[in-house]
Image (cartoon, grey):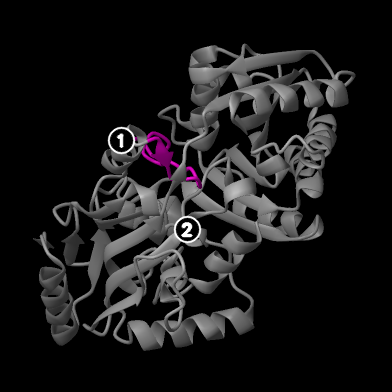
Amino acid sequence: MTTFTPSSPADVLSTVQWAVAEESPLEIFGHGSKRGIGRPLQTEHTLDLSKLTGVTLYEPAELVLSARAGTPLAEIEKLLAAYGQQFAFEPMDYGPLLGGEPGRGTIGGVLASNLSGPRRLKAGAARDHILGIGAVAGRGEAFKSGGRVVKNVTGYDLSKLMAGSWGTLAVATDVTFKVLPAAETEVTLAIRGLLDDAAVVAMALALGSSAEVSSAAHLPERIAARVAAGHLGSDAATLLRVEGFGPSVVYRIEALRRLLGKAGPLQEIAGEASKAIWRGVRDCAPFADGGARPVWRVSMAPSQAHHMVMALRMQAAVDAFYDWQGGMVWLSMRESDPEAELLRGLIRKYGGGHATLVRASASHRAALPVFEPQPPHLAALSARLKAEFDPKHILNPGRMAPGTGSATLVRSTEEAAS
């Protein structure tokens, strides 16, 4: 096996051109923090982008940052924090969930997997904040899309097409993101002891109010104890995050107290304690226990997700918690359960959605459709996109779908709609 470690976009281009000429597929990764997601690859050569690093542009006043694709996300977030700024979409760190170290993800991986976190309800995902990219297609051709300004409308927005493609269409070499000021104050209001159905109602009330809640999640009994070093205790916790200027946050928290005072006991959590809780929710800390149980990520209508989970529990041993007002469900199941067929069947029964297997053994991932199978019309369109960008199936072949790894449009569709 040959591992290529380019340190410049020109090196990436020459490596992909060689692979195309030799018709030799490449596995693409940065630091490998998300390498365990998707179907296992069997390629003779790898393209390691961990040396393609460096922030190439940062203009805090213009809210724009550009960096090489292999730049560690933790390094960029530290730079942004020094200027009181952040990625508003709050990208998840998959490392601990997949048995790795925290802080190993790269900025290119953020785009390739279209990461987001609990603030997704308010801020969207990576695809909603990308301004431009430089990349090398599987044809061995370099291209650019977008630019380095917020108001950029040049040509087709291929930057968003790359979001959620998992390296199956092109190798990103440079990315430019919009950044935003970090909130001055953060407070979480926790309603304690609610069952899943009551929690869904409470979150809907909060999100429908004028309190401008930026995140809403529900941690059922015992699950709550697995975040923020047990700070919440074991009772169920329905979490509502309010961010902004201090006086505004105080006013909005008080409005939520009046609105939800009869729902259950209320607990107010501020500052670093609040941030630790939401990092735990973001990074799926309840299931990042070093275990091997399969973990699924489900996106569906918030009003139906808890019904699906209840029906699933009748047939399988399941732990679950909810983010995005209940519209995103993290599930931990046993490998022996007929999980893919059962889970996706119940999702269809309760209004439809998408299920992605994000943690499992290599043999388990090889045996199951890891990403949501596409309907025929989307599968045909995805195949056409793959043929245009990577006709010889050089880049991450088979990672998203058997044979070609071309199942990318449904990822973008799912993330846009969630």
Label 1 Cα crowd, 10 Å radius (few <14 / some 14-19 / many 20+): few
* Contact between labelled residues 1 and 2, with CB atoms less than 8 Å apart: no
Three-letter amino acid code at disc 1? Lys
| Nearest the eye: 239 or 289 | 239
Give the side of residue 407 with respect to residue 390, left or right. Answer: right
Image coords of residue 77 (percent x, y)? 34, 39
State left or right for residue 283 relative to residue 27. Answer: right
Pick whichever, 71 or 167, lies toward us. 71
Quarter of the image with the N terminus in it = bottom left
Q: Is residue 100 magenta?
A: yes
Q: Is residue 42 visible?
A: no
For badge 2, the amino acid type reads His
Whole-percent x, y for residue 395 in the image: 29, 72
Query: In the picture provided, is 68 more to the left or to the right than 153?
Result: left
Range of magenta residues: 84-101
Q: Secondary structure at mark 2?
A: loop
Where residue 167 appears, x then y in whole percent? 34, 66
Magenta: predominant secondary structure element?
loop
- Residue highlighted by disc 1: 78
Taking the spot 52% from the left edge, 19% from the top edge, the residue there is: 271
Q: Is residue 52 above or below residue 249?
A: below
Quarter of the C terminus within the rendering: bottom right
Where is mark 2, residue-wise?
A: 129
